[in-house]
Image (tube, grey):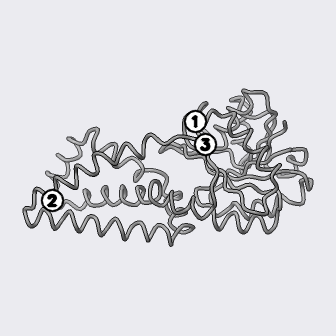
Amino acid sequence: MKIGIVGLGLIGGSLGLDLRAIGHQILGVSRRSSTCQEALARGIVDDAGVNLSMLAAADVVFICTPLSAIIPTIEELIPHISAHTIVTDVGSVKTPIVKAAAAIWPNFVGGHPMAGTTESGLDAAISNLFAGNPYVLTPVETTPANAVKVVEEIVRSLACKFYLCRPEDHDKAVAWISHLPVIVSAGLIDACMSETDPNVLELAQQLASSGFRDTSRVGGGNPELGVMMARYNKGELLRSLQQYRHRVDELIAHIEESDWHALEEKLKQTHHSRPEFLGSKST
């Protein structure tokens, strides 16, 4: 199958590596010719260029651009592809993207691979990035069944955990387990940096180890991604942040009142609840 990838960054590049390794012909498009040359040199793509016209022969096109560029990219792509071409994306917010994309391209299938690193760009692309991680498709009633089937087969070939759900349910769920952690993690780093004693701040930075590394990782990631999550999933993110603030206020109250029993009960609950988020099964 001929597969086009628009946006040769971490996700696009990693997709190219895995899909080309299992026999697909990969056509890559990037804004920079230097990125195209690097992708060719690394064996990520079979051919690459800066013009969308090179995707005319593609059976499926993955849009791997930032969220704000997904719809404009599809609009620019449409004149160059056939009516049978299937278009999918990898955006972390689905409701506004699926609604806008389906209106201009019937063969659109919303998608979101739940995989990544704190690094970005083609240099960060690696093989097997998606293996063992969730990959969600979010078709709607008007999405052609065959288009969903084709994208599903490609996605499953990545050895990921495959899921289907409504765009709205996806956005509510990822607000809790992806978008909220980014903002909370960023707030943790920002709070630590508010320490006014330079000696204490330096000591804290020197003593930081696995606990701080784990809880601060997503907050130290790509700022553009964080802003796009907040911008495109604003309502659901605010809802989750307000609930989080309420829970933090409860914890503060337990500590202020020296209610160690209540605090212990809450920590017991979180101790038992955490595994439920780490052992979900694919469909």
Give the residue type at disc 1: Leu
Sequence-first tag of 3 and 1: 1
Between 129 and 155, which is closer to the camera in this rendering?
Answer: 155
Residue in the picture at 61% in, 47% down: 163
Residue 247 at x, y = what percent? 28, 65
Give the residue type at disc 3: Thr
Residue 211 at x, y = what percent? 27, 42
Marks 3 and 1 sit apart, C-alpha to C-alpha, by 20 Å
Residue 139 at x, y = what percent? 71, 57
Q: Quadrant of residue 67?
A: bottom right
- Residue located beneath label 3 in the image: 283
Check if mark 2's residue and mark 1's residue have beta carbons within 8 Å.
Answer: no
Name the mark on residue 262.
2
- Residue located beneath label 1 in the image: 129
Marks 2 and 1 sit apart, C-alpha to C-alpha, by 41 Å
Q: Quadrant of the N terminus?
A: top right
Between 173 and 206, which is closer to the camera in this rendering?
Answer: 173
Between 18 and 159, which is closer to the camera in this rendering?
Answer: 159
Q: Is residue 68 visible to the viewer in this orientation of the structure?
A: yes
Residue in the picture at 58% in, 33% down: 131
Q: Is residue 250 above or below residue 11?
A: below
Secondary structure at badge 1 equals loop
Secondary structure at badge 3 equals loop
Judged by depth in the image, the label closer to the viewer, 3 or 1, is: 3
Sequence-first tag of 3 and 2: 2
Q: Is residue 248 above or below residue 279?
A: below
